[in-house]
Image (cartoon, rainbow, N blue to C red):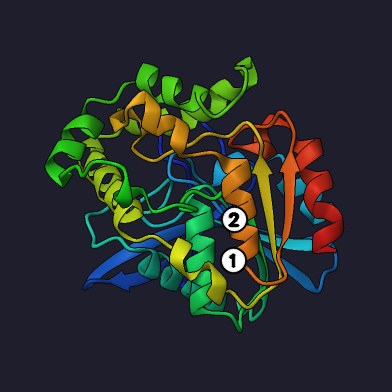
Amino acid sequence: MLVSIGIQSYSQITYPYPLQSIKLTIEGKEVNMAYMDIKPVSTTKNILLLHGKNFNGYYWKELIPLLVAAGYRVIVPDQVGWGQSDRINLHYSFHMLAANTRSLLKTLEIEKITVLGHSMGGMLATRFALMYPEMTDKLILENPIGLEDYKTFVPYQSIDSLFIKERSATYESYKKYQQSYYPSWKPEYEQYVQSQANDLQRPDFATIALINAITYQMIYEQPVCYELDKLKVPTLLVIGDADRTIVGKDKLSETAKKDHGNYPILGKLAQQKIKGSTLKILKGTGHIPHIQDINVFWKAIETWIQ
């Protein structure tokens, strides 16, 4: 069932397009999954945008109008556990999130779609394409995490210890982490910190902190890098050459940090694994090209997706 929903009063961020939701049943619980569905005047093309772990659909707001102008119907979900979707304690997995996303597309009667995933969304996009290749027209991976297996070099952390860390989060700690995404910080990036920090004001923040801990563990325990050679859809890798993101980086020695998270190298290795894939490395660009320089990012994907 499709319904329209409003932004909760604790939110200081307004989504760029109206939000709707579908009802899913997950582990016996009724769950709302929020999404934006933006349609051009006429189209035969669809594209799905999958957000990263510290974000939600809001941060696609500059890319959406470019895609719509190019004739794409743009589907932008907040995954269950994020943003304006329900935030409840579940057994989170990339398989579950991919299945939820398929349910959304089936409800919207979309049978074929280009999938663009950023950061954690890149891991999810990969899992989606592996599970549902018949639905995946093309695959775009924008600085996807999980191009290396973090559990082979990052020390293990229990859910309890991760929960304590997430429960103690502040606006300042979120901002400090997001600052690592860019070669240099700009005032216009503050809105994306605010989008994440809205959670701090929610009465259910303890549950959200637990979800954040569980989904960190999901990334750690469910690598996709060993299955890249199984992708059978046209794939574009867009990599910022200044990106050095590592999940669990704060647990590494300085030597270990230098040995991992080198995205230009990881991108080249991924390209070798994904048969027929295309690699575009963006100079001077960090972890979020579509925010740091939307024009450079659009130029990198425009011709390829058309």
Tell me the residue at 51%/22% (across/down): 179
* Residue 203 sits in quarter: top left
Helix, strand, or loop for circle 1?
A: helix
Q: Name the mark on residue 269.
A: 2
What is the three-letter code of the residue carrying label 2? Leu
Residue occupying the point 63% across, 78% down: 232
* x and y, in percent, of residue 96 in the image: 36, 69
What type is the residue that disc 1 sits on? Lys
Q: Closer to the camera, 29 or 101?
A: 101
Which residue: 37% across, 70% down? 24
Taking 296 as reference, is 101 left or right? left
Question: Around disc 1, counting alpha carbons within 10 Å, would you say few (fewer than 14), some (14 to 19), or many (20 or more)?
Answer: some
Badge number at residue 236: none
Residue at the location (48% across, 36% down)? 245
Which secondary structure, mark 2? helix
Residue 273: mark: 1
Q: Position of residue 56 (x, y in %)?
A: 49, 44
Q: Are marks 2 and 1 in contact (CB under 8 Å)?
A: yes
Q: Is residue 167 left or right of residue 20?
A: left
* Residue 41 vertical position relative to residue 110 in the rendered view, above or below: above
The picture places residue 176, in percent across and down from the top left corner, at 43, 19
Query: Dot 2: few (<14), some (14–19), or many (≥20) neighbours within 10 Å?
Result: few
Q: Looking at the image, which residue sits at the far bottom? A: 134
Q: In this view, does 272 lie to the left or right of 276?
A: left
**To which quarter of the image does residue 106 belong?**
bottom right
